[in-house]
Image (cartoon, rainbow, N blue to C red):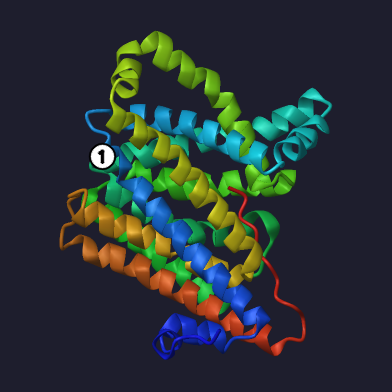
Amino acid sequence: MSKSPLISRLPFISIWADSDAQQRTALKGVILAIVSNLLFGVLYFYSSLLQPLTGTQVFIWRMLSMWVVLVGFLAITGRLSFHINRLRELSSFKQWLWLLLPTPIFFSQLWLFMWAPVNDQGVQVAMGYFLFPLMMVVFGFIFFGERLSRLQWLAVLFAMLGIGLEMLRTQSVSWATLWVCGTYPIYYILRRLQGITAMTGMLVDLSLFLPIAIGYLVIAAPGNFMFVTGSGLYFMLVASLGVISVLALKTNIDASQILPVNVFGMMSYLEPLVLFVLAITVLGDSFETSMLYSYGFIWLGIMFLIAHGIQQIRANRRSPKPWQKGARVS
């Protein structure tokens, strides 16, 4: 059965039809990365949808619903036993302590992600996510001796200049921005050194928080539990919070396994851009004109980092080596 001429002229259909197998795989990875970043954007204003629940309460419900959805997904797909067997390989107390070392960072980051949008810190957290890739470059240079290109040095220089201007303007620097860009690299690096997959690490982190979430809802705040479970709307919003979270994680992991490292890294800038726009337009966070100078330098640094990524992609295309795939650990 032949395709309709109208359908075949659609841009996406035309690009897909004219692509070879490798290009279609790359296009699939790009689509998954876009979907993942947009889903994280949806999660960012979820706390405002669940008011009068506080950001902390939304975080607790998110952790609980994520655990239910994640365990259910792994059980249905037959992958739960794989992750459990992977954890059974840890035989000593030292190995378990090493595994759990980054877990508090994970808790704090997910809490901040839910708390900030309803506490006038949405722009600051979004800026932390803008700075995160730059900090990964710095951490790679300091701890792993990775050599930086001229463009990467320029990216770090302009980002530091932007942070310095913001400190002069406000006589301080946002703790939310520093926490995101300062501790998330530590979490990623530790998980990578441990050789733990994103799903396994997430399963461990959520399982550890499960008794805390249940204890809070049943013992510390039973009224909150009754409020959510007694409302069909709020119960569905909480349930979908877990579904969207796991779906965002799954599409992000799939994209990281398909796309080259540099392409996946550049696609990751879509998330902070979506968060930043949402913080100003939907959440109503303040953004002063004077902030354009400091934030402008930071964005200029990001543009240099993107330029470095494009340069690497072109170099890889000229290389006979196959595409190198990237993997995100959380």
Task: Kindly identify which residue carries mark 1.
Answer: 49
Of 17 and 49, nearer the camera is 17
Q: Height in image: 148 above or below 35? A: below
Left or right of 175 on screen, residue 86 = right
Q: Residue at x 70, y 34 (%)?
A: 99
The residue positioned farthest toward the front in the image shown: 1
| Residue 168 percent coordinates (x, y) | 26, 55
Q: Height in image: 236 above or below 326? A: above
Residue 130 appearing in the image: no
| Residue 188 percent coordinates (x, y) | 60, 48
How many numbered circles are shown?
A: 1
Q: Height in image: 212 above or below 87? A: above
Circle 1 Cα neighbour tier, 10 Å, few/some/many (<14 / 14–19 / ≥20): few
Of 131 and 63, nearer the camera is 63
Q: The N terminus lies in which quarter of the figure?
A: bottom right
| Residue 167 percent coordinates (x, y) | 29, 52
| Residue 224 percent coordinates (x, y) | 31, 18
Q: Residue at x 42, y 12 (%)?
A: 218
Of 228 and 107, nearer the camera is 228
Residue 151 appearing in the image: yes
Q: Quadrant of residue 18?
A: bottom right
Q: Quadrant of residue 88?
A: top right
Q: Height in image: 314 above or below 46? A: below
* Amino acid type of the residue that numbered disc 1 sits on in the rendered structure: Leu
User: The residue tagged with tag 1: helix, strand or loop?
Assistant: helix
